[in-house]
Amino acid sequence: ATIADVLQARTSLSQQRLSYETVKGQIETLRGQLTTALGVPIDLPLDAAPLPEDENVDEVVRSVDILIADAERLRPDLAAARSRALAAKSHVRSVRSGGLPTLSLGASINRTWFEGSDALASYGDNYSLGLFFHWPVFTGFKTAYDTRQAEAFAEAADAQAETDAQQVIYQVWSSYYNLQTAVQQVLATRDLLESSKESAEVARGRYKEGVGSILDLLTAESALATALAQDVRSRAGFLLGVAQLAHDTGTVDLGPGAPEKKGTP
């Protein structure tokens, strides 16, 4: 090779070493953020598991309608909001019943002992039975005001539950189509990586035979490195998309072959 080729190759190597050291620093910063989020010492050895070599993206996503139905049935925060709405409605009935007439039945029995009595029986039994009818005549409109307040709280809780349900539907809808996009990115990246590998091999062969320039070779190798990085990003994005959709639907795992949460169709 000419000295110009050697210098260009050295320049490219220096640039890649600089990029490599920059990424290494970013990785250590991310490790620190992760340990802080986990609440463990920042110097604790921590590393990420390697990505799977291949991702089956063909059968991972079910119908969005089924996923929305799963979320409405399985999301614990939505179930809690609905429970609060039902409790508020029950409270309205309880407050309203406080201003209505009530009928109650009461009974009692007691025995009294007599000390120092000459009577044959040294005790006496007392029995009582009562039927009580309570009619609130005037309470200063307290019952009416309490009822209105309880109804307002119930309406607010019901509206909040409806808002939460719409938010859950939006989250599932957004996660579903984000995952669909991630699937297409994985497929496109596979094609890009394959063509980049072939292009790099051709460029190496042409350079060895003396019919290709060093610039063509470095460009092809740079494109291959970019394709490799994009392949990693797309596969990682796909797995994150699966995890986000699982979170938003309240299920455990949506991956193919993985056990589904009980009750999930």
Image (cartoon, helix red, strand yellow):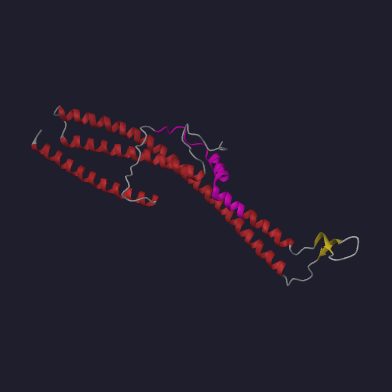
User: Measured from the top left, where is residue 112 in percent x and y?
Assistant: 83, 63
Q: Residue at x 71, y 67 (%)?
A: 144
Q: Quadrant of the rendered structure where residue 207 is?
A: top left
Does residue 62 belong to the magenta stretch?
Answer: yes
Between residue 16 and residue 4, name the one nearer to us: 16
User: Measured from the top left, where is residue 155 in percent x and y?
Assistant: 63, 59
Total numbered labels placed on residues in the image: 0
User: Measured from the top left, where is residue 71 in percent x and y?
Assistant: 54, 44
Q: Residue at x 39, y 41 (%)?
A: 237
Residue stretch rendered in magenta on the structure? 55-84
Between residue 189 and residue 105, name the one nearer to us: 105
- Above or below residue 70? Residue 94 is below
Does residue 237 belong to the magenta stretch?
Answer: no
User: Measured from the top left, where is residue 172 in percent x and y?
Assistant: 50, 45
Asked whether, in this view, residue 202 is left or right of residue 78, the answer is left
Q: Residue at x 49, y 40 (%)?
A: 252
> In the rendered view of the protein, which quadrant contains the N terminus?
top left
Between residue 210 and residue 194, name the one nearer to us: 194
Which secondary structure is most common in the magenta stretch? helix
Asked whether, in this view, residue 39 is left or right of residue 195, the answer is right
> In the rendered view of the protein, which quadrant contains the C terminus?
top right
Q: Quadrant of the rendered structure where residue 243 is?
A: top left
- Above or below residue 144? Residue 180 is above
Q: Quadrant of the rendered structure where residue 99 is?
A: bottom right
